[in-house]
């Protein structure tokens, strides 16, 4: 029975309702067959803040490719979905929405605000699920998780309490990075540094005794209200007499001492610096050594407090401007210089970070770092990122984990006066819980095991699917996430949370720039899917870079991906139009050379593609598959099969080979192209789904590759000859093949009808020896090809062309000889010009002799 495929590939019809069918059938669900070996990937949870971008599409496509193949290979494959509450980012979005409604979170209070936050989560979780569906991700939704789920909160509390009991979590005052917009602490890796043009302000700090002043340079004048000292090096002769004296903070009557400390670099600037312990990490250490006070001169929103006197209430930057103006009028500004320096900005809100002394919770990283570096056995792909990870771990600082937010895991700590208790339940009525929540990355670090039931290590999911097999993520969050999962996994489960970590790069625009809102160069994957289909986007996005390398968004390459899918559709349609029975089985005793060749090449392709699939080199796997499908199966075997299908001896077996190859091709491509392969597979083979079919294996090996190559080369060389002589493929040629190799002679005789057809030869002969001046020779190692000239060229026209070339060359030779025989030219011309003319003359002579030789053959 003939199968009717639409003449045209229409991706919207192909992809429509297919995902819902998979969901309804439960094909994504793991755990149905406990006899299978488990294989686990947990999705890096996207933030519930908005739409997924191209980076998410790339990240999840890689994961889905791995999981679909493993499922077909017979594994109990779990692809666990989930989302991240994303504390700062989500709270900022909710605050913005409330602000537009004229409401502050403080108007609502914590409980009402959290109700709004959960409403936001439900709304945006729906958007993300729709996008997962559009991206074709085979996620097991029965095991979906959210980082604020109760079970995950249990895991977070368990980890916090255990680390606290071990002495690896502590609370104390330290200089931290402060986000004045979000009004929360940030960890070091949540700060992005950028080269920024600012100012270097040189101020005069007057001695209190009126005897002069000391010059101090700073980039942050507004912090001077919290200065506690000026500092010089004890060996700096310029300032020895001033140590112990006092100065006024410029424009105030606040006096501060001049102290000495060998921290000061005598060669930098004036050799004297101001000490502001509450607003600078280095000054903080100095302040501790010298037992200085540590007052703050700013509020948590970046406005100045009462220490700033008349500037109280001003924004820090407005204060800077007005203060500098006032001090200039007082003659206390020495100079102001343009200054390019690295400035930290909040990774979440984009505001300039303020170093600030604050009471926060920290993780002491020493013990976690040592055991992670010593005990982890994670394979990094590419391997070079292992060094990146280890270098960062060697230089890691204590982790600030408290955040001054409401949306997040509330810290399980309770206070009564100076007493602190760390536990989940309240110790009593007069105890108050810490208002702060934990850094989002604290809960994300537990994701590979908290999602599977931890801290209950007897949980069926934990026992079966942990540790996970592969963690796929971008190289840009090795420090944010990968490292933290590794040290928390080793500490709390005793094993690495994943066996391998596969790191991909960033998607950049066509000019190589990082995609960003400010540049306006972002691309919505949903727009691409709407234009080209998910399969085309997916095929492009995973096929254009090696692991760890960036890729560039390129519309032409997406169009090329669509063209390949269209080619696959047309190839399949050709096969369906020539098949009588889709249940045909290959008869190995009746395979012709071309059948044996394509089956051998299919086996080799399966093995090579498997090698690249296992190494996560999907760009190489893609190349292997497309080359086989396009260049060998479609361009050669399909064309050759048109003759075999007309041969009663081979007809049925050729149909069987076509079906066998097509079935394996669709399976090999399914991880890349889930929708179109499913459509074609179901329609042709009448099976329930390609998703639950078995992965192809290499089955056939025949020693025919060299023999086929000889036939291929003969056909290719004649085609190339036609191109070089501009002879149409439809024009028959007289061709003689000459070989002394008896094996090849037998093969060529057996398949002479194929050669006659593909060479388009009106007179095809196979001879042991041949030599005729009326034939063009194409020499080969085992076979010489002779093509009669009369079929290639118009002799009279060729003679006319050669005579025209001869006349032109004679004139050029005459001109060149005259010039080279002219002493005025040879003596006065630059050497380069003379050499160039001599070279021209030599070339003209050679071309002239070649033309004469050609004319001899025709005259």
Image: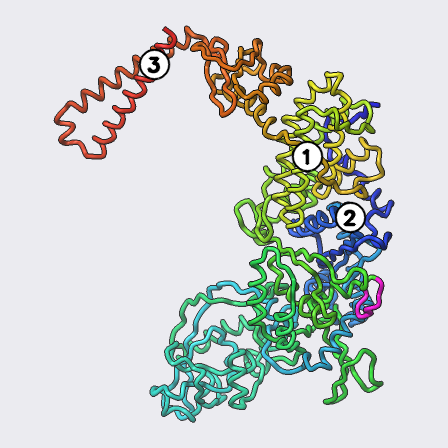
> What's the distance in space between the residues labelled 3 and 2, CA to CA?
68 Å
Q: Earlier in the sequence, mark 3 or mark 2?
A: 2
Residues in magenta, as a range: 453-460
Q: Mark 2 or mark 1, which is nearer to you?
A: 1
Q: Residue at x 59, y 73 (%)?
A: 177
Q: Earlier in the sequence, mark 2 or mark 1?
A: 2
Q: Residue at x 84, y 36 (%)?
A: 687
Q: Mark 3 or mark 2, which is nearer to you?
A: 3
Q: Is residue 14 left or right of residue 739?
A: right
Q: Which mark is residue 701?
A: 1
Q: Residues within 10 Å of mark 1 (few under 14, many from 20)?
A: some
- The C terminus sits in image quarter: top left
> What's the distance in space between the residues labelled 3 and 1, CA to CA?
50 Å
Tag 2, which secondary structure? helix
Q: Mark 3 or mark 1, which is nearer to you?
A: 1
Answer above or below: position of 575 versus 738.
below
The answer to whether residue 329 shows anywhere in this view is no
Image x and y of residue 658, in percent: 73, 28
Answer above or below: position of 515 versus 600.
below
Q: Residues within 10 Å of mark 3 (few under 14, many from 20)?
A: few
Q: Residue at x 64, y 66 (%)?
A: 483
Q: Earlier in the sequence, mark 3 or mark 1?
A: 1
Image x and y of residue 284, in percent: 54, 82
Q: Is residue 533 left or right of residue 757?
A: right
Depth check, front residue: 134 or 205? 134
Task: Count all numbered tags in the image, as a single digit.
Answer: 3
- Residue 778 falls inside the magenta stretch: no
Residue named by callout 2? 71
- The answer to which quarter of the image holds residue 446 is bottom right
Depth check, front residue: 676 or 749? 749
Residue named by callout 3? 853
Tag 3, which secondary structure? helix
């Amino acid at each position: 029975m003939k199968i009717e495929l639409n003449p045209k590939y229409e991706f919207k019809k192909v992809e429509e309702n297919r995902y819902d069918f998979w969901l309804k059938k439960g094909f994504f669900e793991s755990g149905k067959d406990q006899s299978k070996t488990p294989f686990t990937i947990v999705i890096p949870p996207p933030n519930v803040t908005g739409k997924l971008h191209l980076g998410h599409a790339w990240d999840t496509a890689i994961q889905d490719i791995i999981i679909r193949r493993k499922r077909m290979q017979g594994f109990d494959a779990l692809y666990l979905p989930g989302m991240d509450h994303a504390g700062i980012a989500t709270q900022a979005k909710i605050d913005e929405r409330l602000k537009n409604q004229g409401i502050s979170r403080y108007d609502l209070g914590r409980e009402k605000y959290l109700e709004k936050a959960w409403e936001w989560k439900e709304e945006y979780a729906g958007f993300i699920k729709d996008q997962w569906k559009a991206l074709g991700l085979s996620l097991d939704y029965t095991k979906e998780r959210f980082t604020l789920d109760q079970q995950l909160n249990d895991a977070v509390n368990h980890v916090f309490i255990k680390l606290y009991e071990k002495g690896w979590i502590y609370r104390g005052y330290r200089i931290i990075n402060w986000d004045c917009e979000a009004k929360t602490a940030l960890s070091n890796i949540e700060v992005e540094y950028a080269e920024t043009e600012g100012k270097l302000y040189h101020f005069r700090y007057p001695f209190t005794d009126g005897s002069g002043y000391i010059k101090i340079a700073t980039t942050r004048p507004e912090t001077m209200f919290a200065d506690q000292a000026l500092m010089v090096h004890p060996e700096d002769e310029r300032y020895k007499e001033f140590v112990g004296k006092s100065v006024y903070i410029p424009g105030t009557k606040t006096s501060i001492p001049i102290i000495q400390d060998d921290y000061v670099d005598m060669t930098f600037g004036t050799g004297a610096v101001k000490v502001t312990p509450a607003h600078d990490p280095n000054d903080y250490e100095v302040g501790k050594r010298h037992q200085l006070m540590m007052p703050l001169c700013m509020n948590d929103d970046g406005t100045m407090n009462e220490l700033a006197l008349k500037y109280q209430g001003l924004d820090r930057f407005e204060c800077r401007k007005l203060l500098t103006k006032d001090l200039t009028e007082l003659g206390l500004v020495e100079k102001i210089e343009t200054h390019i320096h690295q400035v930290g900005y909040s990774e979440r809100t984009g505001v300039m970070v303020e170093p600030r002394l604050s009471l926060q919770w920290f993780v002491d990283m020493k013990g976690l770092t040592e055991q992670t570096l010593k005990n982890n056995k994670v394979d990094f792909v590419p391997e070079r990122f292992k060094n990146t990870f280890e270098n960062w771990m060697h230089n890691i600082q204590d982790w600030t984990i408290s955040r001054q937010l409401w949306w997040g895991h509330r810290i399980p700590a309770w206070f009564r006066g100076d007493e602190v208790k760390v536990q989940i339940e309240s110790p009593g009525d007069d105890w108050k819980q810490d208002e702060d929540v934990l850094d989002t990355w604290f809960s994300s670090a537990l994701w590979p095991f908290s999602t599977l039931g931890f801290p209950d290590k007897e949980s069926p999911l934990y026992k079966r699917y942990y540790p996970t097999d592969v963690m796929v993520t971008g190289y840009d969050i090795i420090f944010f996430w990968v490292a933290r999962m590794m040290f928390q996994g080793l500490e709390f489960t005793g094993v690495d949370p994943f066996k391998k970590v596969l790191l991909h790069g960033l998607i950049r625009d066509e000019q190589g720039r990082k995609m960003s809102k400010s540049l306006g160069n972002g691309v919505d994957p949903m727009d691409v899917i709407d234009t080209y289909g998910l399969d085309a986007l997916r095929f492009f996005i995973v096929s254009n870079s090696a692991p760890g390398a960036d890729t560039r968004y390129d519309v032409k390459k997406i169009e090329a991906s669509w063209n390949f899918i269209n080619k696959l559709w047309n190839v399949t349609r050709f096969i369906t139009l020539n098949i009588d029975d889709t249940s045909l089985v290959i008869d190995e005793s009746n395979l012709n050379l071309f059948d044996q060749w394509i089956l051998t090449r299919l086996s080799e392709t399966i093995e090579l593609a498997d090698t690249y699939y296992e190494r996560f080199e999907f760009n190489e796997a893609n190349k292997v598959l497309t080359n086989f499908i396009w260049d060998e199966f479609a361009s050669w075997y399909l064309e050759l099969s048109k003759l075999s299908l007309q041969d009663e001896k081979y007809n049925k077996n050729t149909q069987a080979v076509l079906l066998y190859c097509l079935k394996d091709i669709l399976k090999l491509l399914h991880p890349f192209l889930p929708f179109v392969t499913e459509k074609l597979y179901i329609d042709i083979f009448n099976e329930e789904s390609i998703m639950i079919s078995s992965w192809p294996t290499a089955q056939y090996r025949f020693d025919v590759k060299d023999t086929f190559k000889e036939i291929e080369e003969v056909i290719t060389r004649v085609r190339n000859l036609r191109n070089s002589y501009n002879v149409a493929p439809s024009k028959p040629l007289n061709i003689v093949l000459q070989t002394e190799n008896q094996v090849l002679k037998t093969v060529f005789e057996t398949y002479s009808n194929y050669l006659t057809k593909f060479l388009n030869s009106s007179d095809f002969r196979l001879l042991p020896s041949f030599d005729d001046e009326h034939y063009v020779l194409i020499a080969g190692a085992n076979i010489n090809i002779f093509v009669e000239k009369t079929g290639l060229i118009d002799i009279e026209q060729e003679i006319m062309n050669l005579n025209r070339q001869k006349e032109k060359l004679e004139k050029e030779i005459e001109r060149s000889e005259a010039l080279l025989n002219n002493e005025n030219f040879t003596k006065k011309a630059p050497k380069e010009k003379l050499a160039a003319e001599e070279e021209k003359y030599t070339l003209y002579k050679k071309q002239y002799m070649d033309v004469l030789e050609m004319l001899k053959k025709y005259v």
